[in-house]
């Protein structure tokens, strides 16, 4: 190697470089002498880039020529605070031109070494060639979802607890719509850099989908994660400036901690996505902590979700359906039943689907689970029809099903294979289906109606969209949310509200269903209300196939009402 201007600096630089190389375990090492500006790097980096020697005399300036022009501004913004001593660590991803003239993706991370005077003496770290674009986001140059899951698994294998913090930008599609995708990409680039800057080397940042990022750390505590999210939220609200335009942004975020155990990374991802959705749709952007800061609908632990996912991948082991009878308006006859998914294991006992389905809704395993529900429900339905030819089967559908372009095709295939008549099937639209969009909902409902399948709006009355959806969608029935009947026995006002809600519904649809009729007093209070069918423990608790078959045989012959 050529001589340095200062032999003292050369000796120190060589010693520090050798120490970094031993610690780097084969990674490409870089070391910048802050005082003299020399940059030394590994021979592997020299060969990959096609550099003439293993150091640069004017390191920061010369290295800049190899960085992609679009990434140089971020690199400049990183170097200044490190040299001045305002920052002590760095973690940046950018494109570097290699010797064949193409650009490869590199992640560079390291820290500042201070001299006896307390000022930065060296800036050293490692560079990782991330290379293949399928694992790197082309817009932000951050690693993608698959890399996050791989890193999460690696930490778990090493026995290290981790924190995963998901941060997203609310209503980001508006910027793409009004200003174009190129403008939106520049916002994402600046947000990605801002997050890395605030993280200060305490973890790694990934872009997983859309305007959403994940931060993975094995050293940050819950309070640190919450503080980091608050800082990101604050910086976004202050605005990201692009071409002189300050773009005011709003964040939403989810957090999950996972201890080293047998938990699979996809289960962590599923629970984190659920916490993120809670923040976005129900918590007004407040950070939602899956590990306990909000009610996640009874799911008791990450271990539970992991076990359910594993069971779903193993042929839906332990899954079964229970059926809650749907009664006629006078409460004397069973018109049909609503299928409810349950799961049983020796470790957790019986778990009702309400405790885990909302969490798994965005998981790809949800398709396996719903396919099981559909097959089992239709096959059981054929047995129920033998006991009562007028029987009506009700199954729940979720947003993920509606957004599957093959939903109707798959449904009709299962109907043909089972032999179950479409006119005896009703599908209850889960409240989250509203987020699928009005046009998709209308198109789906019309397709169901064409086949004779009954469609029901579930949770009617809750949420601001209920009435507008009822006016716009050609559904056959509504199921009124249970919250509207909880206090009608002792409250005249609540009775009036429920009656008014039913009158609105009955002006648009012919059938009104009411769940949660759990006492004789409640049944008495509902006399005279314009409802069509009822459900609740006052009549029957959910039962398995043979129990419902026996109940239907005792039911006698009658003309069944539709839902």
Image (cartoon, helix red, strand yellow):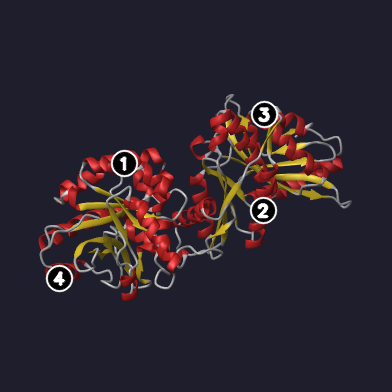
**Cα separation between marks 3 and 2:** 36 Å
**Cα separation between marks 3 and 1:** 53 Å
Residue that badge 1 annotates: 444
Callouts 3 and 2 close, C-beta under 8 Å: no
Q: Secondary structure at mark 4?
A: helix
Q: Secondary structure at mark 2?
A: helix
Callouts 3 and 4 close, C-beta under 8 Å: no
Q: Which label sits in the foreground, 3 or 1?
A: 1
Q: Is residue 134 left or right of residue 413?
A: right
User: Quick one: 416 or 467, which is closer to the camera?
Assistant: 467
Q: Is residue 528 left or right of residue 242?
A: left
How many residues crowd mark 1 within 10 Å: few (<14), some (14–19), many (20+)? Answer: some
**Cα separation between marks 4 and 2:** 57 Å
Decide: is 28 above or below 252.
above
User: Residue 195 placed where, x, y %?
Assistant: 65, 45
Residue that badge 3 annotates: 66
**Cα separation between marks 4 and 1:** 35 Å
Q: Which mark is residue 230?
A: 2
Q: Is residue 227 left or right of residue 359?
A: right
User: Residue 250 placed where, x, y %?
Assistant: 61, 45
How many residues crowd mark 3 within 10 Å: few (<14), some (14–19), many (20+)? Answer: some
Q: Secondary structure at mark 1?
A: helix
Image-quadrant location for residue 305: bottom left
Decide: is 171 above or below 178.
below
Name the residue furthest bottom.
520
Residue that badge 4 annotates: 550
User: Residue 389 placed where, x, y %?
Assistant: 11, 58
Decide: is 65 above or below 316.
above
């Amino acid at each position: 190697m050529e001589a340095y201007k200062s032999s003292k600096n050369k000796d120190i630089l060589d010693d520090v470089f050798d120490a970094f190389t031993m610690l780097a375990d084969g990674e490409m090492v870089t070391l910048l002498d802050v005082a003299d500006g020399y940059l030394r790097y590994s021979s592997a980096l020299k060969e990959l880039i096609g550099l003439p020697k293993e150091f640069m005399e004017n390191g920061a300036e010369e290295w800049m020529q190899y960085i992609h022009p679009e990434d140089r501004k971020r690199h400049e913004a990183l170097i200044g605070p490190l040299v001045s001593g305002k920052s002590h660590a760095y973690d940046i991803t950018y494109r570097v031109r290699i010797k064949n003239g193409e650009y490869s993706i590199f992640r560079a991370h390291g820290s500042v070494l201070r001299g006896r005077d307390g000022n930065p003496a060296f800036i050293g770290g490692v560079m990782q060639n991330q290379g293949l674009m399928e694992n790197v986001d082309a817009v932000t140059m951050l690693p993608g979802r698959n890399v996050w899951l791989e890193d999460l698994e690696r930490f778990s294998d090493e026995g290290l607890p981790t924190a995963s913090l998901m941060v997203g930008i609310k209503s980001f599609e508006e910027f793409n719509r009004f200003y174009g995708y190129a403008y939106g990409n520049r916002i994402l680039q600046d947000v990605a850099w801002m997050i890395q800057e605030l993280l200060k080397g305490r973890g790694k940042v990934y872009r997983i989908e859309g305007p959403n990022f994940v931060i993975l750390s094995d050293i940050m505590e819950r309070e640190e994660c919450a503080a980091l999210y608050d800082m990101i939220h604050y910086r976004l609200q202050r605005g990201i400036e692009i071409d002189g335009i300050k773009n005011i942004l709003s964040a939403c975020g989810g957090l999950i901690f996972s201890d080293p155990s047998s938990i699979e990374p996809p289960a962590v991802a599923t629970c984190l996505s659920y916490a993120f959705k809670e923040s976005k749709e129900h918590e007004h952007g407040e950070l939602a902590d899956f590990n306990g800061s909000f009610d996640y609908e009874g799911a008791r632990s990450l271990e539970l979700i992991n076990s359910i996912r594993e069971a779903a991948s193993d042929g839906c082991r332990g899954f079964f359906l229970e059926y809650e009878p749907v009664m006629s308006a006078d409460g004397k006859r069973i018109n049909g039943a609503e299928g409810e998914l349950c799961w049983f294991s020796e470790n957790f006992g019986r778990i009702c689907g309400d405790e885990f389905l909302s969490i798994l809704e965005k998981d790809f395993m949800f398709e396996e689970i719903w396919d099981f529900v559909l097959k089992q429900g239709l096959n059981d339905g054929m047995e129920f029809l033998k006991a009562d030819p007028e029987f009506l089967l009700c199954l729940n559908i979720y947003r993920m099903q509606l957004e599957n372009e093959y939903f109707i095709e798959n449904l009709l295939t299962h109907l043909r294979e089972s032999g179950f008549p479409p006119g005896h099937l009703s599908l209850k639209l889960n409240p989250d289906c509203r987020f699928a969009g009005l046009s998709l909902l209308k198109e789906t409902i019309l397709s169901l109606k064409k086949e004779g399948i009954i469609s029901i709006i579930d949770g009617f009355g809750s949420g601001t969209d209920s009435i507008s959806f009822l006016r716009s969608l050609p559904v056959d029935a509504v199921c009124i949310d249970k919250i509207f009947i909880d206090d009608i026995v002792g409250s005249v006002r609540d009775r009036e509200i429920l009656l008014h809600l039913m009158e609105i519904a009955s002006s648009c649809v012919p059938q009104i269903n009411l769940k949660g009729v759990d006492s004789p007093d409640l049944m008495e209070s509902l006399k005279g209300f314009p409802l069509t069918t009822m459900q609740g423990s006052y009549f029957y608790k959910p039962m398995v196939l043979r129990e419902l078959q026996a109940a239907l045989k005792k039911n006698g012959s009658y003309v069944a009402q539709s839902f």
